[in-house]
Amino acid sequence: MTQDEALFQFLLRMGDSTLILGHRVSEWCGVAPVLEEDIALANTALDLIGQTQMWLGLAADIEGQGRDADQLAFLRDVWDFRNLLLTEMPNGDFGQTLMRQFLFDAWHSVQLGHLITSTDTRIAGIAAKASKEVAYHLERSAETVVALGDGSAESHKRMSQALEYLWPFANEMFVGDEVDAVLFKAGIAPDPASMRAEYDILVERVLDQATLTRPDKDFAHKGGKTGRQHTEHLGHLLATMQWLQRAYPNSKW
Amino acid sequence: MGWAMKTSIEQVWDWLDAVPDPEIPVISIVDLGIVRGVEWKGDTLHVAVTPTYSGCPATRMIELDIETALRANGVEQLVLERRIAPAWTTDWLSDNGRAKLEEYGIAPPSQAGGPERCPQCGSKALTRVSQFGSTPCKAHWRCDSCLEPFDYFKCI
């Protein structure tokens, strides 16, 4: 695997994760429990989709096949997506959406923190930009996890269930492969396994405040970042997200 | 257009300072601090713009407004560069811009992480409603004295 091949895969992993989560979060637009939450979710989705344009734009440049970010987003099928499985999981209730967001935001902030010092200045530049936005995402999702976890008996129960359900998907974030090894050696991206300790400290502090317990299972559902085995949910999401470009090819806004 | 005919860089900055931000029209894009460079390269004018938030839907509108303003002033060859790094920061907002924001009813960014005072009545008794607001760059606050809700320009 050449460095550029690894870089392309890595950029898809970043851009597809922000794209798919951005789309998922945008599904709340107009139907969130209260107006303030609706606005916060829509703004989070907007940031994530903006970051997607940078990651997939760079991926398309590296690939050098004449594709652009839009073509990568709208004209690939399930098996070509490299997003973390966590990001494609259904919204469930509001609590499950915010638990998913928190588990992702915590990883995202740690990951971007490392990428700011990447030897690839293009990646460092995108990471510096994105990390400012993600600081706000993390602040909000952590606050909401605490409010609901340490809330009523019903909200506590739902947050516990969401955590148990999502945790094995979050574990995929720390499973490395050849792509990660090539980029780690070149100083471009961190070794995923090495981020676990940092992640656990952050997550456990918030879960503790939320009166929730970090599951001790380290089993990981895998296959999102490699594209080998997405869940059944991704195809349905893409069918909605890509419909317009598929039905009316090359249509422009 | 020969070298002698070229407009001065100062003049171009003045033209850009007349382009309002599409979402907060009381401040110009120069006040906002997103115009990061203006220079002639031969007969072509290069203007670098740094977006505030990655997903800000106003970015394309701003680029279009810049192009329209400069073409209206006779600039023929123009290249707009979208510059990501260094990332935009609220530190680049001009003092003039901060004053105009407050006058308009938007509390300017503050290092403390929240507004200094209510832009309506000046009270310091404030409550944060949400870290997110009507645009990506703003949070939603409320004054506990005059009870008016207001936007706070987030510090990033």
Image: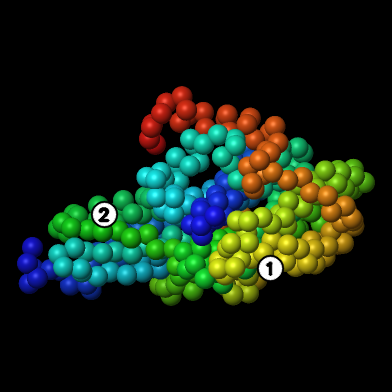
B86 with respect to B120 (left or right):
left
Residue beneath disc 2: B67
| Chain holding disc 1 | B
* Left or right position of A242 against A29: left
Between residues B127 and B110, which one lies in front from this camera angle? B110
The answer to which of marks 2 and 1 sits earlier in the sequence is 2
- Hey, which quadrant is residue B34 in on the image? bottom left
Query: As rendered, which of A165 and A62 lies closer to the eye?
Result: A62
Chain ID, mark 2: B
Q: Is residue B67 left or right of residue B130?
A: left
Residue A12 screen position, x and y as percent = 55, 49
* Residue B16 in the figure: left or right of residue A37: left
- Is A226 above or below relative to A77? below
Secondary structure of residue under mark 2: helix
Q: Residue B129, can we see it?
A: no
Q: Residues within 10 Å of mark 2 (few under 14, many from 20)?
A: some
Quadrant for the C terminus of chain A in the image: top left
Residue at x 37% of width, y 50% of height:
B61
Disc sitting over residue B125 in the figure: 1
The quadrant in which residue A31 appears is: top right
Which kind of residue does numbered mark 2 sit on?
Glu
Q: Quarter holding the N terminus of chain A?
A: bottom right
Give how far apart the Cα atoms at labels 2 and 1 are.
Answer: 43 Å
Looking at numbered disc 1 in the image, what kind of residue is underneath it? Ala
Where does the image place residue A144, in percent across and percent down from the top left?
Answer: 76, 54
